[in-house]
Image (tube, rainbow, N blue to C red):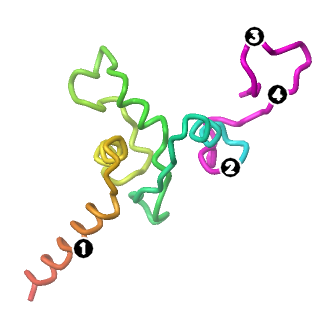
Amino acid sequence: MMVYNKPLSDIKKGEKKIEYFIHTAGNHEANNGYFKFLSEFLQLPIVQVEANSQTGYNPLYLQMVFSASFIEQKRGWASFLATVRSFNIYNYKRRVIEYLLEISPETNYDSIRVLSERNRVLGQS
């Protein structure tokens, strides 16, 4: 994707533009990633959340956050965030809601997970 750093009305032929990549791994972290540019432009921080796999953590993708502001008319009324892809993120719908409400997932969810694990271990004793 090509981006000009000025209003559309001020762009002249041959004007310098910046190329960003999109829909590629790393587009939220890399300096030339479009979603990194977009998050900085919109002043929306990209947070790391727990992944379903051994990778540990993944970014909470902006596509997931943006889908919360749009209800798709065919399937969207079945559930809030009905059309959100998981992107291999653990409990992804909850993470989107936590992000929108500015709730720290580390504080709440990790505490619940630790307590659940302790409860499971104590139940086996």
- Asked whether, in this view, residue 115 is left or right of residue 56, the answer is left
Q: Amino acid at mark 3?
A: Ser
Which amino acid type corresponds to the residue marked 1 in the rendered image?
Answer: Val
Q: Which mark is residue 41?
A: none
Few, some or many residues within 10 Å of mark 3 (<14, 14–19, 20+): few
The residue where tag 3 is placed is: 9
Give the camera-side residue of 58 and 8.
Answer: 8
**Mark 3–mark 1 CB contact (< 8 Å):** no
Q: Earlier in the sequence, mark 1 or mark 2?
A: 2
Q: Earlier in the sequence, mark 4 or mark 3?
A: 3
* On screen, residue 92 above or below 80: below
Q: Secondary structure at mark 2?
A: loop
Q: Which residue is mark 1?
A: 114
Please state which amino acid type lies under the numbered disc 4: Lys
Residue 114 in view (yes/no):
yes
Foreground of the two, 100 or 35? 100
Tag 2 residue: 30
To which residue does mark 4 refer? Answer: 17
